[in-house]
Image (spheres, rainbow, N blue to C red):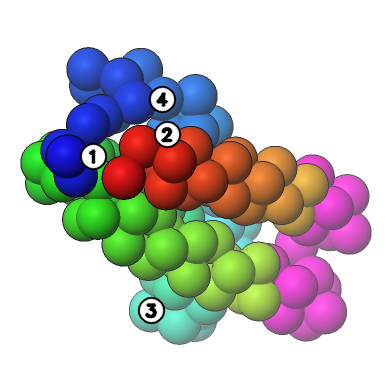
Amino acid sequence: MGDRKVVDTYRDLVVWKKAMRLSVDVYRATSGLPSDERFGLTSQMRRASSSIAANIAEGHDRGSTNDFVRFLWIANGSRVELETHLMLAGELGFLSREVVKELLATTEEIGRMLVGLRRSLDQTK
């Protein structure tokens, strides 16, 4: 009770794989931001994007379903933080509308997957 895992390793989770891909895409997209944003928006976006996958991984390996669910909520918080930064970067003209649209579509997909995984885990409690 409370220690059942969905998969053997977090690397098997599709949502973790998508979050990793998103982080790579964010790193690439932010490489062209103005140099004076290196410690501002660029850093914030990169940290938020990498935090999504990192929290999924950490939660999975914490050893309990309750911890895993809690870390999935944290991952979701990083996801919506990233969405906010993406919209800001778009509004400021740092990223094209198309890039913002593509990245937001991925964050929304990850959000749906996080909800589904949390619901699945809640059923195992």
Whether tag 1 and tag 2 are in contact, CB under 8 A, the answer is yes
Q: Which residue is mark 2?
A: 16
Q: Earlier in the sequence, mark 3 or mark 1?
A: 3
Residue depicted at x 62% and y 74%: 85
The Cα–Cα distance between marks 1 and 2, rounded to whole angstroms, is 10 Å
Mark 4 highlights which residue? 13
Q: Residues within 10 Å of mark 4 (few under 14, many from 20)?
A: some
Residue at 37% across, 66% down: 74
* Residue at left offset 41%, top offset 25%: 13
The answer to which quarter of the image holds residue 44 is bottom left
**Do the CB atoms of the residues marked 2 and 3 lie less than 8 Å apart?**
no
Q: Are marks 1 and 4 in contact (CB under 8 Å)?
A: yes
Q: Position of residue 57 (x, y in %)?
A: 26, 40
Q: Which residues are magenta?
A: 86-102
Please report contact status of discs 2 and 4: CB closer than 8 Å, yes or no. yes
Q: Please tell me whether mark 3 or mark 1 is closer to you in this view.
A: 1
Disc 4 residue type (three-letter): Leu
Q: Is residue 75 above or below residue 106?
A: below
Disc 4, SS: loop
Measure the alpha-carbon separation of dots 3 and 1: 30 Å
Secondary structure of residue under mark 2: helix
Q: Is residue 26 above or below residue 34?
A: above
Q: Quadrant of the N terminus?
A: top left
Tag of residue 60: 1
